[in-house]
Image (tube, rainbow, N blue to C red):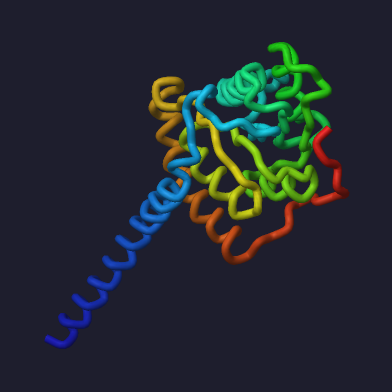
Amino acid sequence: MRTLSLLLHWRLLLGVVIVSSILSPFTLGLYVNAATNTRRFTEADKVPTQKVAVVFGAGIRPDNTPTPMLADRVSAAVDLYKLGRVQKLLMTGDNSRVDYNEVMVMQNYAIAQGVPVEDITLDHAGFSTYESCYRAKEVFGVKEAILVTQNFHLPRAVYTCRQLGIESTGLGTPDWGSYSKKTVSFYTFREQVSTLKALWEVHITRPSPTFLGRFEGIK
């Protein structure tokens, strides 16, 4: 009887651990969403004016053109620029290899839509949302910004940048209805895990970025 009782006890404990593991990312995701709710917008003309828009990378194709998600982010930032909501664009992304220059593709895409090159600054070492926010403040001197990314990513981006000292609002580009359900479902699920990592980084470990470098400022 005691053996059966112990078995039931451990099964119950295991069940609690499993349920907690599942609910924890979801619960923390709700917290981050709630904490940034009033700072996220879906229409460019509703976003409060700031000097700089920070545009997060989202991958490029082998022919050096932006992925659909990246194209949407850059186009949204261009809209902010043309509306006079921002004066400068900070493109932050991955240029870890000579043959992979995400931010140059972003710059070229913005220039093709009418943004002068002198109003675009490139962060070649924005390898993650955390590193992009960290470098935006410490390398480029950004204290206030509009963050531009897809809606599923925006809560984490705004939360991370704010915790790292940037007074941030965000413009979210459409996701559901713009891409396949499979794609958005994948990124939405991944965001739960990424949010846990972000909370760990901003509240506990505060790691330095892969590359910090000298102060550059926004040109």
Residue at the far left in the pictured view? 1
Question: Can residue 214 be spotted in the picture?
Answer: yes
Nearer to us in this view, 184 or 27: 27
Nearer to us in this view, 6 or 95: 95
Residue at the far bottom in the pictured view? 2
**Residue in the image at 64% along x and 30% along y:** 59
| Residue 67 shown left or right of residue 42 in the figure | right
x and y percentages locating residue 125 in the rendered image: 76, 42
**Residue in the image at 27% along x and 66% along y:** 15
Question: Can residue 66 be spotted in the picture?
Answer: no
Q: Is residue 47 above or below residue 143?
A: above
| Residue 52 shown left or right of residue 202 in the figure | right
Q: In which quarter of the image is the C terminus?
A: top right
Nearer to us in this view, 51 or 100: 51
Q: In this view, does 104 lie above or below 130?
A: above
Count the marks.
0
**Residue in the image at 76% along x and 51% along y:** 210
x and y percentages locating residue 28 in the rendered image: 42, 55
When asked about the image quadrant of residue 164, the answer is bottom right
Q: Quadrant of the N terminus?
A: bottom left
| Residue 166 shown left or right of residue 175 in the figure | right
x and y percentages locating residue 3 in the rendered image: 18, 84
Q: In this view, does 113 lie above or below 133?
A: above
When asked about the image quadrant of residue 180, the answer is top left
**Residue in the image at 45% along x and 27% along y:** 175
x and y percentages locating residue 106 in the rendered image: 71, 24
